[in-house]
């Protein structure tokens, strides 16, 4: 299957790749979903294709890279499927909390069976870390740099910045 190949870890696990991806996410138009605004390839789910990025001439689905960052596991050989509950599944969403592993039979079944699988973050921040992260970002620090600094995935940082988590901390 096209795009279903092992990820090139040497290329994706660095700041540059993180920035290429994190600069192309729209957090606002569908609350809860992280909508890819970059290039798409293929036409499996919609005519617009799936979020994709090219690495040395080969195309990779962004959802697979985001999955790797979140879980430190290459999803290969499985598919990365959407679970945007309660939103309708959005093929352009790359919120890792809305992504899960599956296979082809799953993909068929999924149209009929929906369940919310929340992937909890194991990292807990204290209040002063939350404030530091938000302040640093307000002052222009990049999500990917903050993710490295705190040893978490970029989506964990963005959830803090956008008040999806720790809403009660000002
Ligand atoms: Zn989603």
Image (cartoon, helix red, strand yellow):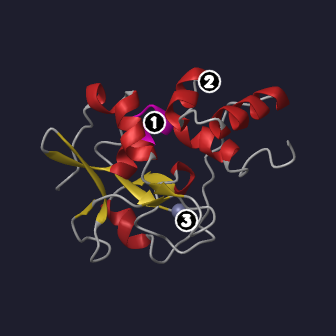
Residue 91 position in % (x across, y down)? 40, 67
Q: Nearer the viewer, residue 79 or 46?
A: 46
Q: Is residue 78 magenta?
A: no
Q: Secondary structure at mark 2?
A: helix
User: Can you tell which quarter of the image residue 114 is in?
Assistant: bottom right
Instruction: From the viewer's perspective, tell me whether residue 30 is left or right of residue 57.
Output: right
Q: Is ligand 1 within 8 Å of the beta carbon of the residue shown at mark 2?
A: no
- What is the total number of numbered labels drawn onto the structure image? 3
Q: What's the magenta region? A: 67-73
Q: Is mark 3 within 8 Å of ligand 1?
A: yes
Q: Which residue is mark 1?
A: 69
**Quick one: SS at disc 1?**
helix
> Which numbered disc flags the more N-terminal residue, 3 or 1?
1
Closer to the chain start, of discs 2 and 1, is 1
In the rendering, at what x and y percent does residue 23 appear? 44, 47
Residue labelled with disc 3: 84
Which residue is under mark 2? 150
């Amino acid at each position: 299957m096209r795009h279903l190949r092992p990820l090139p870890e040497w290329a994706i696990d660095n700041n540059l790749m993180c920035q290429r991806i994190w600069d192309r996410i729209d957090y606002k138009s569908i609350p809860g979903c992280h909508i890819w605004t970059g290039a798409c390839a293929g036409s499996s789910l919609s005519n617009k294709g799936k979020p994709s990025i090219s690495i040395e001439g080969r195309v990779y689905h962004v959802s697979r890279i985001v999955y790797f960052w979140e879980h430190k596991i290459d999803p290969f050989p499985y598919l990365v499927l959407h679970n945007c509950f309660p939103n309708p599944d959005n093929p352009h969403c790359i919120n890792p909390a809305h992504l899960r592993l599956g296979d082809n039979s799953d993909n068929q079944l999924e149209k009929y069976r929906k369940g919310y699988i929340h992937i909890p973050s194991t990292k807990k921040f204290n209040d002063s870390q939350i404030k530091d992260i938000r302040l640093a970002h307000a002052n222009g620090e990049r999500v990917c740099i903050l993710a490295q600094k705190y040893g978490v995935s970029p989506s964990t940082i963005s959830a803090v910045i956008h008040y999806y988590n720790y809403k009660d901390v000002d």
